[in-house]
């Protein structure tokens, strides 16, 4: 009878160890896949027509500055630069959003000097 009880305890411990290993393996697989990349929202804050300075920088920045809230200089993001970054699939997989936050009152006009880039990323 003692041997039967000992075998049951050993089997229970083995089963618990197997469940723990399975949970650890699942956690490692999830970590190995890396973080999920959410879509990015770009805020156009200029009517100028500059391209993005560094594609794949994970942000819209032409290398110029514009006056932001409170008179603070902020990185310029033009429509062309926002399209450049949104279409650069190496760093921004998935659907991105381009919003407009051009300072000042009244209607704003963006007049590109040449055709805007074709969006090819999906």
Image (spheres, rainbow, N blue to C red):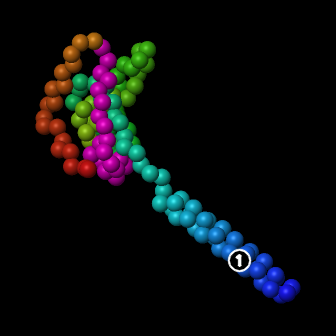
86 inside magenta stretch:
yes
Q: Position of residue 91 (x, y in %)?
A: 37, 49
In the visual, does 45 lie left or right of 26?
left
Quarter location, residue 75: top left
Q: Position of residue 81 (x, y in %)?
A: 27, 36
Name which residue lies at 76% across and 80% down: 8
Q: Residue furthest right?
A: 2
Q: Main secondary structure of the magenta part?
A: loop
For mark 1, does the 10 Å Cα neighbourhood hold few (<14), some (14 to 19), or many (20 or more) residues?
few
- Res 121 visible: yes
Front residue of 5 and 79? 5
SS class, disc 1: helix
Name which residue lies at 21% across and 16% down: 107
Q: Position of residue 19 (x, y in %)?
A: 64, 70
Q: Looking at the picture, does residue 40 appear above or below residue 17? A: above
Magenta-colored span: 85-104
98 inside magenta stretch:
yes
- Res 51 visible: no
Residue beneath disc 1: 14
In the visual, does 113 lie left or right of 58?
left
Q: Looking at the picture, does residue 12 appear above or below residue 34? A: below
Quadrant of image for the N terminus: bottom right
Quarter location, residue 45: top left
Front residue of 69 and 26? 26
Name which residue lies at 82% across and 82% down: 6
Q: Residue furthest front?
A: 1
Q: Position of residue 58 (x, y in %)?
A: 39, 42
Name which residue lies at 34% across and 22% down: 66
Q: Residue furthest top?
A: 105
């Amino acid at each position: 009878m003692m041997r039967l009880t000992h075998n049951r305890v050993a089997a229970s411990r083995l089963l618990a160890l197997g469940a723990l290993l399975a949970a650890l393996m699942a956690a490692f697989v999830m970590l190995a896949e890396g973080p999920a990349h959410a879509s990015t929202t770009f805020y156009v804050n200029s009517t100028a027509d500059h391209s993005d300075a560094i594609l794949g920088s994970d942000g819209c920045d032409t290398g110029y500055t514009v006056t932001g809230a409170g008179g603070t200089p902020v990185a310029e993001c033009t429509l062309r630069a926002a399209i450049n970054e949104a279409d650069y699939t190496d760093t921004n997989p998935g659907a991105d959003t381009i919003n407009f936050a051009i300072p000042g009152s009244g209607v704003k006009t963006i007049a590109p000097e040449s055709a805007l880039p074709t969006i090819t990323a999906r």
